Amino acid sequence: MSPTRVLVLNSGSSSLKYQLLDMRDSSRLAAGLVERIGEQTSRIRHTCLATGDSREHGGPIADHDAALKAVSQELSRDGLGLDSPELAAIGHRVVHGGMFFTEPTVVDDEVLAEIERLIPVAPLHNPANLTGIRTARALRPDLPQVAVFDTAFHTTMPESAARYAIDPKIADRHRIRRYGFHGTSHAYVSRATARLLGRAPEEVNVIVLHLGNGASASAVAGGRCVDTSMGLTPLEGLVMGTRSGDLDPAVIFHLARVGGMSMDEIDTLLNKRSGLFGLCGDNDMREIRRRIDEGDAEAELAFDIYIHRLKKYIGAYYAVLGRVDAVAFTAGVGENAAPVRAAAVAGLEELGLAVDPELNAVRADGPRLVSPAGARVAVAVVPTDEELEIATQTYALVGAGANNS
């Protein structure tokens, strides 16, 4: 029997998230997280989803090699180890693939070198992603390692959307263009929205709103991304938990020249001390809504700024697409914050957008419509599943029987 399991790894600078899936029915067999790698207070949390057994261990985990070995040990305790002949491949989330990688790719030395060359445009993410891949290759050199890129879904953008209006020679020399991120989520959600509508992805135009601590929007025409809100980096676009999103580039010059701030200080300000957190001191939408209910004007202004930017992108992507069949909300805020969904489409009734208050207030696990019956544009809540998307793309690439070839 051909191997059918895929291990999905999401390697951060000090963390390693993982899920093991069986692609016969896309079921999850195990999942977990190793955090604070490189510290004395490292911790691994592991759940065998087949049995419901959960375990948690503390103690120093020196590096990603030790972290993956710890994961392998936990999986082995459940009979699901990395040495299992049922493991078909390991799929890796890689944040930045530039223009070189437009689809999932089996990793070899040339692929690793290109991911490394992209580090200047993804200094926070690609080094950690590379570490995870190299560690997994060392442990299972016989197994296909597949890189699935956050940027790949957005490579279908036309040049008119992807280019910045600067000297193209300078832009090309330094790889400056709009790449977009959260691509695995946008791909998954756009297709899941089409299924919810009972239509093929090629027939549907969708605005996807991935609203978590990081947030991005995309315009998807017939299954292909034609525009997205994040750009060269994940800083551009919507107001986020700690990131500013769009702002006049001259703000940076002003802070440097007049404010006397260094480039590193400005980088930290815009990426870690802005957005909702910078506006009101909280980046948890639940806490912000609680403060609004108590009459907190600072929290209310932060919420209003967040919604204003979100609504602008909905309108802009409506114009880009020309016809919109659905607006899909996903990720932590998009899936759980009913007030955000209601406020985002309020006043857009002339565009066919509205939510039914009772449907919008319902908490449920699966994809669902929250727009009124017969609405011209469906408003949907579609839980994202980036791990399943990575596993699906990985398994589709390696094919059944890859290990037997």
Image (spheres, rainbow, N blue to C red):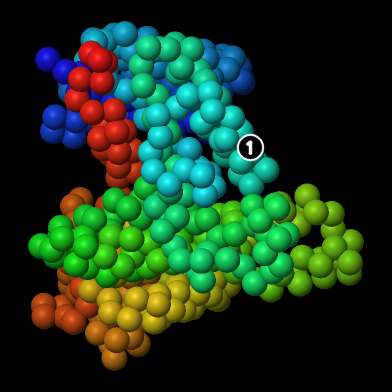
Give residue 324's quadrant in the image: bottom left
Quarter placement of the C terminus: top left
Report whether 142 appears left or right of 1.
Answer: right
Residue nearest the viewer, comparing 162 with 62: 162
- Residue 329 seen in the figure: no
Report whether 172 appears left or right of 65.
Answer: right
Give the vertical position of 140 relative to 377 (above or below): above
- Residue 161 seen in the figure: yes
Give the vertical position of 81 relative to 96 (above or below): above
Residue nearest the viewer, comparing 347 with 171: 171
Give the vertical position of 16 relative to 97 (above or below): above
Where is residue 155? Give x, y as percent: 45, 55
Tell me which amino acid carries mark 1: Arg
Where is residue 42? Give x, y as percent: 54, 21
Please report the residue visible at 61 percent of the width from the left and 20 percent of the height from the top: 38
Q: Which residue reaches farthest front?
A: 169
Quarter placement of the N terminus: top left
Residue nearest the viewer, comparing 163 with 71: 163
Please report the residue visible at 52 percent of the width from the left and 49 percent of the height from the top: 99
Please report the residue visible at 21 percent of the width from the left and 55 percent of the height from the top: 192
Where is residue 153? Give x, y as percent: 39, 52
Kindly identify which residue carries mark 1: 117
Residue nearest the viewer, comparing 289 with 92: 92
Where is residue 137? Give x, y as percent: 46, 17
| Count of numbered circles in the view | 1
Please report the residue visible at 22 percent of the width from the left and 78 percent of the height from the top: 377
Where disc 1 sits, the SS reads: helix
Pointer 1: residues within 10 angstroms few (<14), some, or many (20+)? Answer: some
